[in-house]
Image (spheres, rainbow, N blue to C red):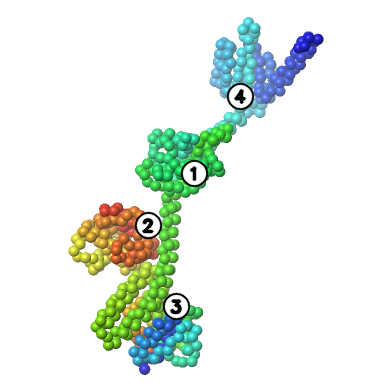
Amino acid sequence: MNGGSIPLSRLYHYGNHMKDIYTHLIENAAVLMLYLDHHGKIALCNKQAESTIGLKHADIVGRNWLEVLFRDTNNIMKRDMFKAVLDDALTYKRTRDFACHLLGNHGNLRLISWNITPILDINNQLQGSILFGQDITEIQERENSIKKIDDSLKNIISSINEYALYVINLNSLITYFGMGCETMFGYSKSEIIFKHVSILHNLNKAGPELDMILECVRLFGKYESEIDLFTKAGVVIPVRLTVNQFLDAFGKLTGFIFIAKDITQTKKLEYQVFQAEKLAALGQLSAGMAHEINNPLFVISGRLEILKQEELTPKLKETINLIDAQTNRIRKLVDRILKFARKSTLTLETVDINEIIELALPLVNHNISPSVKVEIKKSFEKNMPKISADADQLEEVFLNIIINAYHAMPDGGVIKITTRNFQDLYAQIQITDTGVGIPAADFKNIFMPFFSTKGQGTGLGLSICHNIIKNHNGSIELESQVNQGTTFTIKLPFI
Amino acid sequence: MLYKILVVDDEAPVRDLLGDLFKKEDCLPVSCGSGEEALTILEKETFDVVLLDIKLPGISGLEVLKEIRQKYTDLPVVMITGFGFDEELIVKSKQLGCCGYIGKNMPVAQIIVTFMQFVKEAKERGSAS
């Protein structure tokens, strides 16, 4: 026997075997298969087609394909379109695709993606056509629901302004800039897309900061921390930043998703609580300290008092008077400390804030140098609602702030005092000077006890003001620019 | 002798100073360093007035005041403290029945004058009733 030749009987057998396999494949394939003759009648159909169409083999074979597939008369337009596509495939002898619904075996509509292949004989003459159909109803439903989720997510992201969502590619260029981003950062989409993401970070440390963030995401899959980002105008926004990997359908890393939550308000509240706690602790410490100083001070002053009644040389008398004066100085300081530390009880009465300011103004003259020329401009809201307050304590607050304003203007200037009714909710009092101003770095310490920008101040005045206003459920804030002036804004709730 | 005064303060220099100042006013001061000691002394001796420090080791000045008020109804007590004029302490002391409150941060001469005034008023109230 020659190597490689196959006996004819075996070939015949082999051919029959292959035919069986093909028949089996067609019959049991998970796709719909229909063979149409050149008149459009269905000559063959497989089990999947019978099952999906919902008719028996005998009710399908021999009938026109349009009658079988489009029993649903509401679908005439689709039927005509499908017919046109089939005619095109047959006329031009080419494969065409078409998707349409057909009425399924349980009366429900199924979405089928069809592929039409013309069958030609050896002379290139049209014999008929094969229709392969794949039921894509579930796939389409899945895609629709994913799209719906995607759309809702997009809507949610667009509508939440305290969040900003943006995406960068592997070269750190911004490829997606959500709606929240424009509000938070002040850049429009068109001006920031394909810009390097470092534009949103602190320029001095953007490189190392971003490297660290992205390395962290690569290693641990996620980065989460509080950092400062920057707006187009250069304003710092404290954010809670979450960065995740952006993977494609195959799980390959294609970029990074950044979600930044603006935590300015949270930070502000945290700072206020921290300040309040710090002040309370300082108050306690100061009270204890003042008590410990008062006892020996009392002994020193008392002994001095007794000494003064003795026969003394003029030199000794002078020395004792000096010690007495210095002791008095310490006593006054300790009194101020105790005043700051004390949780004074308020003597509340119904008061007019404008009247309290008017009463405080003449007292200022006792505390300032008459040579400094300062103009006071008042702009008081008429018919201001009354507030419930301790008039003496509020008078002390205004006196303190106005004296500070004088001290801030050694060469003279203007003090503007305005009162305003803010929506019947609270009285807003603003005291503005045109003095030396306070450096931004000192803002956070300005209400702390013992902090003073003045050479001879005790640094207790503003901390006492802060405590008084806080005890009245109000707030006190300042704005200042060096060499331009300072504005203190006090808000006190109406009754 | 004008008054016999029990001076209660935990600091010896303060006690000595007050003793010397009261002697100058023709008073008889007796001093001790704690509330417990004061209550023991009061059981044995009679006084015209007690000058009582608020911050004491052991039982506090306010607790001593409470006890004195229960046992010696008419004995005037003046409170003294290094905390100065603390409204909360003043109110508490008044509620417990002291006849005066003095801050050690006052000028010394004024402390003695004020103390004498408190005692005088208390005595007058006592004799009136």
CA gap, disc 4 and disc 1:
50 Å
CA gap, disc 2 and disc 3:
35 Å
- Pointer 3 and pointer 1: residues touching (CB < 8 Å)? no
Q: Amino acid at mark 4?
A: Ile
| Residue B73 position within the rendered picture, expressed as x and y whole percent measured from the top left | 45, 87
Helix, strand or loop status at disc 1: helix
Mark 4 vs 1, N-terminal side = 4
Q: Which residue is mark 1?
A: A212
Looking at the rendered image, the disc whose residue lies closer to the viewer, 4 or 1, is 1
Looking at the rendered image, the disc whose residue lies closer to the viewer, 4 or 2, is 2
Looking at the rendered image, the disc whose residue lies closer to the viewer, 2 or 1, is 1
- Pointer 2 and pointer 1: residues touching (CB < 8 Å)? no
| Residue B24 position within the rendered picture, expressed as x and y whole percent measured from the top left | 34, 89
* Letter of the chain that mark 3 sits on in the rendering: B
Residue in the picture at 66% in, 22% down: A32
Relative to A359, does residue A58 appear above or below in the rendering? above
* Letter of the chain that mark 2 sits on in the rendering: A
Q: Which residue is mark 3?
A: B55
Could you classify mark 4 by the number of other residues whose Cα lies within 10 Å: few (under 14), some (14-19), or many (20 or more)? many
Q: Which residue is mark 2?
A: A444
* Letter of the chain that mark 1 sits on in the rendering: A
Q: Amino acid at mark 3?
A: Lys
Q: Which residue is mark 4?
A: A112
Task: Please check whether the numbered discs 4 and 1 fall on a single chain.
Answer: yes
Could you classify mark 1 by the number of other residues whose Cα lies within 10 Å: few (under 14), some (14-19), or many (20 or more)? few
Residue in the picture at 25% in, 61% down: A406
Helix, strand or loop status at disc 2: helix
| Residue B106 position within the rendered picture, expressed as x and y whole percent measured from the top left | 34, 78
Residue in the picture at 63% in, 20% down: A132
- Pointer 2 and pointer 3: residues touching (CB < 8 Å)? no
